[in-house]
Every structure is written in C-alpha cells, then in structure tokens.
Image (cartoon, rainbow, N blue to C red):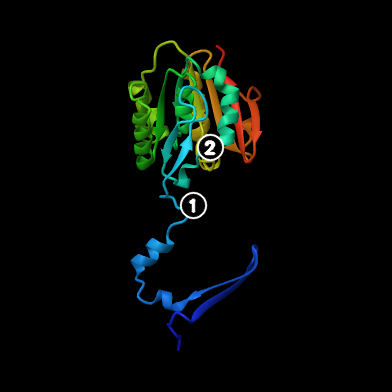
C-alpha cells in the first residue's frame, strides 16, 4: 500500500548520458490533481511551442524594436547572431531592392530587410497562426502599405500564384531569402533547387539570393555551382549570390 499523505515520497533514480541523478516528490501532492491540472501545471516550459516571446530588429529604421513571436520552435527562427552577421554582409545590397522571403517563419528576416532600406517585401509563411502574428507585427510597425504576408506554401505560390499575384515595383532588383526547415535540403532538395533556379531566372539584374542551410548541406549542388559566397556560422551556413545578366 502506498501512503498518500504529504510525507510520503516517490523517488526516481536515473543513470543516462546526463549522469547519475535522483529526484523525488510527495505522493500526496498528486491526490486530487486531475488530468487537466497536471497538464496546466507541468505541460509548460521555457521551450513550450506556445510560450509567447519576442525577437528584436537589429538595425536600420526600426532597430531595437521588438516583434512578437509565438515561441513555436517549429518555425526555427534564425539565431540573432547569424541574422546580424548576414545583414552586415547584405546590408548594402538590401537598400532600394524588393525583398522576398520564401520561408518567413517569424518574419524577422523580412522585417529586418525593410528596416534597412528595402522598398517593400513579400513574406510567405505556411503556418497560419505564425502568419497571423507576422501580420500583427506589420500593423504594429505600420508597414501594411509595403509588406505583404502570403499565408500558404512557398512551392505552391511559386508555381501557381507568383505570375498572377506578385507585383513588385518595376525594374528594381530583388533580395531573396531562402531559409527553409533544414530537412528540406534532404527531403525536398529537388524542389528547393528548382525554386532557387526559377527565382534567379525571373529576378531582375543585380538581384541577390541568400540561402541558409545547416553544415550538412553542400553548396556544390546549388544552381550556379562555384559562384556562391559561402559563410559558415555553425550550425548554420549562409550562401550568397548576385545575379548578373
């Protein structure tokens, strides 16, 4: 028989790759705690996908402003140090161009680009709750007139919607960001490479493309192999290319 008073305790001893450890808790604390209470008290953590948090725009007109982010790690936000390093490289290119972010995630990259002088942006995000947060951030920054959010799949947008719905300012270069889930470089590599090729073909002269992958991906399989400027920021790698006609 287990004593369910507060003085009784259940102990657990483990030994795994974290080392030897032990923890215990009063059994009595469980008495009367229903499934809903256990979920609400124990189901949250600092890494909970639904925990609200914020990201920071680093530089430009909106530098220092914070934007909302759901905390959902499935969006894999680019680490701030990588984003800062990337814009230190591409900042001079961005000004006066039109930004396309095919896998917008939190929207931080596209909004950073606009903050640094991009004339406008189209941000494509498949996850509808995340796209809704991006739209809220755009309203907060009062950028609705120049930043569009497309709630949908980037591959579908490119194949079926870009030619009829995408209307950037005429005759200005594009800055294109490809920062997909890393697994796409394995699971959907053919589609990814075709997407990059298609957009580079359609883009005006002096447009730029920036690809973010993990260190397991080789730039040798990209279109225009050998022409990319490759910058490692482990575990990420940035690959940059400028289009010349």
Instruction: Out of 49 and 63, give the one closest to the viewer.
Output: 63
Whichever of callouts 2 and 1 sits on the residue coming sooner in the sequence is 1
In-image side of 212 versus 105 (left or right): right
Residue furthest to the bottom: 1
Mark 2 lies on residue: 78
Horizontal side, residue 157 vs residue 76: left or right: left
Residue 155 lies, in percent from the top left, at 42, 33
SS type, badge 1: loop
> Considering the image in quadrants, where does the C terminus appear?
top right
User: On the image, which quarter does residue 32 sit in?
Assistant: bottom left
Q: Quadrant of residue 212?
A: top right
Q: Residue 223, can we see it?
A: no
Q: Residue furthest front?
A: 7
Image spot of residue 9 (x, y percent)? 50, 79
Total marks in image: 2
Q: Which mark is residue 148?
A: none
The residue depicted at 57 percent of the width and 13 percent of the height is 244
**Which quadrant of the figure contains the N terminus?**
bottom left
Percent x, y for residue 77? 50, 39
Q: What kind of element bears circle 2?
A: loop
The span from disc 2 to disc 1 (Cα, nearest Å) is 16 Å
Mark 2: few, some, or many residues within 10 Å (few <14, many ≥20)? some
User: Which label sits on residue 47?
Assistant: 1
């Amino acid at each position: 028989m287990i004593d369910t008073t507060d003085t009784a305790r259940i102990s657990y001893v483990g030994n795994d790759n974290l080392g030897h450890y032990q923890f215990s808790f009063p059994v009595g604390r469980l008495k009367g705690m229903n499934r809903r209470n256990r979920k609400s008290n124990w189901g949250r953590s600092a890494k909970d996908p639904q925990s609200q948090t914020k990201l920071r725009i680093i530089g430009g007109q909106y530098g220092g402003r914070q934007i909302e982010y759901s905390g959902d790690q499935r969006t894999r936000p680019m680490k701030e140090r990588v984003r800062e390093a990337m814009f230190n490289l591409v900042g001079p290119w961005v000004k006066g161009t039109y930004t396309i972010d095919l896998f917008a995630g939190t929207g931080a990259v596209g909004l950073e680009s606009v903050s640094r002088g991009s004339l406008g942006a189209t941000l494509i995000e498949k996850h509808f709750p995340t796209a809704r947060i991006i739209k809220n951030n755009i309203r907060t920054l009062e950028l609705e007139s120049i930043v569009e959010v497309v709630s949908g799949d980037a591959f579908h947008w490119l194949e079926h919607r870009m030619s009829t719905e995408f209307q950037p300012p005429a005759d200005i270069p594009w800055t294109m960001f490809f920062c997909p889930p890393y697994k796409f470089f394995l699971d959907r590599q053919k589609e990814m490479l075709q997407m990059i090729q298609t957009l580079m073909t359609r883009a005006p002269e002096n447009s730029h493309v920036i690809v973010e992958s993990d260190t397991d991906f080789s730039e040798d399989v990209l279109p225009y192999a050998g022409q990319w400027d490759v910058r490692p920021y482990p575990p990420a790698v940035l690959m940059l290319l400028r289009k010349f006609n």
